[in-house]
Amino acid sequence: MKRSKSSQRWMKEHFDDEYVLRAQKEGYRSRAVYKLDEIQKKGSILKPGMVVVDLGAAPGGWCQYGSRILGKKGRMIGLDILPIEPIQGVELIQGDFREQEVFDKLLKLLQNCPVDLVISDMAPNISGQSAVDQPRSVYLCELALDLSRQILKKNGDMLIKAFQGEGYSELEKDVRTQFNKVTFRKPRASRPRSNEIYILARGFEV
C-alpha cells in the first residue's frame, strides 16, 4: 500500500524524533513519558507512596515512569480500553471506565483507598476534522474530571491533556470550580504544531 505524502512525512518525523529515540534507548513504551517527566520536574506531582490512577494508559509509558517514583509503598493503577503488556509494580484494568462493570473493578481494586492523583493522556482517534475531533477531546477531559470527582481524596490533584479550541474555555471553568489551583503546561516534548495543553489542577475540593 502506497502511503500518502502526509503519512510519509509523519513517519519520517516520528522515527527522527529525539523523544522517540530517547524512549527506545531508555526502555520506555512511548515518547509521551517525557511530557510527564518535564511536568514532574517542574511540580513534583508524583511522590513516593502515592496512589495514582492513569486513564487511557496504553501503551504504558506513564505507568512505567510513575511506578518508579511511587516505589513499593505506592500504587499505580492503569486503565485503558486497549490491552497493555504487564508492567512490574503496576495494576492494570482493561475496559471502558464509563461502563459500570469496569468502574466497579476500579473501586474494588482501590478498596476505599484514597487516590492522590489522577492523570490522563487520553486523546480521541484523530479524523482530521476539527468539528469532530475537538468535541471528542473535550468529552474525554470531562470524563476524566468526572471520574476524578468520584475517586480523588480531599486536596488530591489531577493532570489531564486537553486541546485548545471550541469547548475548552468551558472545560477550564469547570475544572476551576473543583480545585484550588489550576495551572497549565506545554512540555517541550509536545509536538510544536499540536494545540494540546496539560491542565494541572491541585487541591481537590470534595
Image (tube, grey):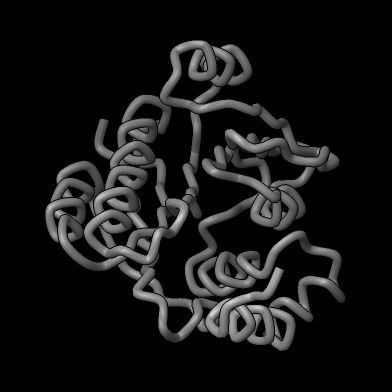
- Horizontal and vertical percent position of residue 109: 63, 18
How many circles with numbers are drawn on the protein? 0
Depth check: give the residue in front, 96 or 26.
96
Residue 3 location, quadrant: bottom right
Q: On the rendered image, what quadrant is the N terminus found in?
A: bottom right
Q: Is residue 22 above or below residue 76?
A: below
- Horizontal and vertical percent position of residue 68: 76, 53
Q: Is residue 157 left or right of residue 133?
A: right
Q: Is residue 89 left or right of residue 125?
A: right
**Residue ID at (49%, 18%):** 103
- Horizontal and vertical percent position of residue 136: 32, 48
**Residue ID at (56%, 70%):** 35
**Residue ID at (65%, 27%):** 93
Q: Is residue 199 above or below residue 53?
A: below
Q: On the rendered image, what quadrant is the C terminus found in?
A: top left
Q: Is residue 107 above or below residue 58?
A: above
Residue 17 location, quadrant: bottom right
Q: Is residue 49 left or right of residue 187?
A: right
- Horizontal and vertical percent position of residue 63: 68, 48
Of all residues shown, which one is farthest toward the front?
1
